[in-house]
Image (cartoon, rainbow, N blue to C red):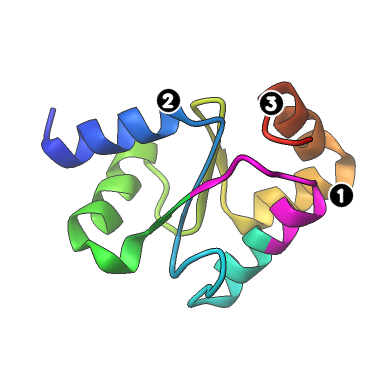
Amino acid sequence: MSDVQTFIRETVTNNPVVLFMKGTAQGPQCGFSARAIQILKSCGVTKLVTVNVLEDEEVRSGIKTYSQWPTIPQLYVAGEFIGGSDIMTEMDQSGELKQALVAAGATE
């Protein structure tokens, strides 16, 4: 396993909620990443790790290989790949996302 794949695996398994995104939580660099952060905030997430894929091309391409998902942002909850902002929106509207986040211990 490459160093990038090891970094990704350890990051998603050692943190309750991880968002691989363009930019940071304070300064998203694309609309989809901004929407993902907005959804997580509205769900009351307090334990969130973000990884800015714009800072490292290896991580940017590596996360797509790791998840077998072509787009960013990518959300992981309790080590499990959830999806991008469209799936997050659907899960938020149905209440599923909040349930997963609470179960992962990521909210207060």
- Give whichever of discs 2 and 3 has the lower sequence position: 2
Between label 2 and label 3, give the one nearer the viewer.
3
Which residue is depicted at the point 67% across and 66% down?
Answer: 35
Does the magenta-highlighted stretch encompass residue 75? no
- Residue 98, quarter of the rendered image: top right
- Give whichever of discs 1 and 3 has the lower sequence position: 1
Q: Which residue is mark 2?
A: 13
In the image, is 41 to the left or to the right of 80? right
- Residue 3, quarter of the rendered image: top left
Magenta range: 38-49
Picture coordinates of residue 19, whole percent (x, y) = 51, 49
Label 2 Cα neighbours within 10 Å, binned few <14 / some 14-19 / many ≥20: some
Picture coordinates of residue 25, whole percent (x, y) = 55, 64
Label 3 Cα neighbours within 10 Å, binned few <14 / some 14-19 / many ≥20: some
Element class at badge 3: loop
In the image, is 77 to the left or to the right of 71? right
Which amino acid, mark 2?
Answer: Thr
